[in-house]
Image (cartoon, rainbow, N blue to C red):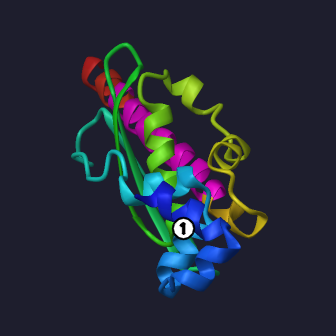
Amino acid sequence: MAGTVAKKCLSPLSVLTRRLSVPEYISQCCYHQKVVDHYENPRNVGSLDKKSKNVGTGLVGAPACGDVMKLQIEVDSQGKIVDAKFKTFGCGSAIASSSLATEWVKGKSVDEALKIKNTDIAKELSLPPVKLHCSMLAEDAIKAALADYRLKQSDDQQEAAKQLQ
């Protein structure tokens, strides 16, 4: 349905024959179809057990626009990310960036996930310049989740070393 409405939005005659509400006009005419898809059908919404030693949690925000993003990763014993979840309070671009980020990190190693850049997310979603901060938040959330995971792993190693002494 969103694709149909978006095509109608682009036709000058459709504006005359059909009135769109402001949120519908903005979401269908100003956002790329991939953003609308991730916004209307977000992937991997939810939470993982933040106390688990193999779960890393990243919580980031942009005070200027009020977007807040929580991204969590679950890593198996071989260092592969087996699950990712997010919760985001923000605009459609922030939600879409979070959703895409969780899809991209799954199946990657911790080191591979660190290579995901905001420019890649922005390009994939065709974000306009005014929305680039959303993709930057997603990259920061990935990095924060990976840093939290690595911190938990180093704490476990230090604790094990103390028990051996």
Is 158 rendered above or below residue 72? above
Type of amino acid at the residue the image marks with label 1? Gln
Residue drawn at (59%, 75%), measured in percent from left and top? 14
Q: Is residue 117 or residue 18 the one in the foreground? A: 18
- Residue 132 location in percent, x, y? 71, 61
Question: Where does residue 124 sit, x and y in percent of width and height?
Answer: 64, 42
Image vertical order of residue 88 relative to residue 139, above or below = below
Q: Is residue 110 above or below residue 90?
A: above
Image location (x, y in percent) of residue 12: 70, 74
Q: Is residue 115 one of those drawn in magenta?
A: no
55 left or right of 142? Answer: left
Q: Which residues are magenta?
A: 135-157
Which residue of the protein is positioned furthest toward the top in this rendering? 78
Task: Identify the residue at image location x=41%, y=19%.
Answer: 79
User: Label 1 crowding class (10 Å Cα cut-off): few <14, some 14-19, many 20+?
Assistant: many
In this view, the residue in front, 33 or 144, is 33
Image position, residue 125 (x, y; %): 62, 49
Q: Main secondary structure of the magenta part?
A: helix
- Which quarter shows the C terminus? top left
Secondary element at tag 1: helix
Can residue 151 be found in the magenta stretch?
yes
Q: Which residue is mark 1?
A: 28
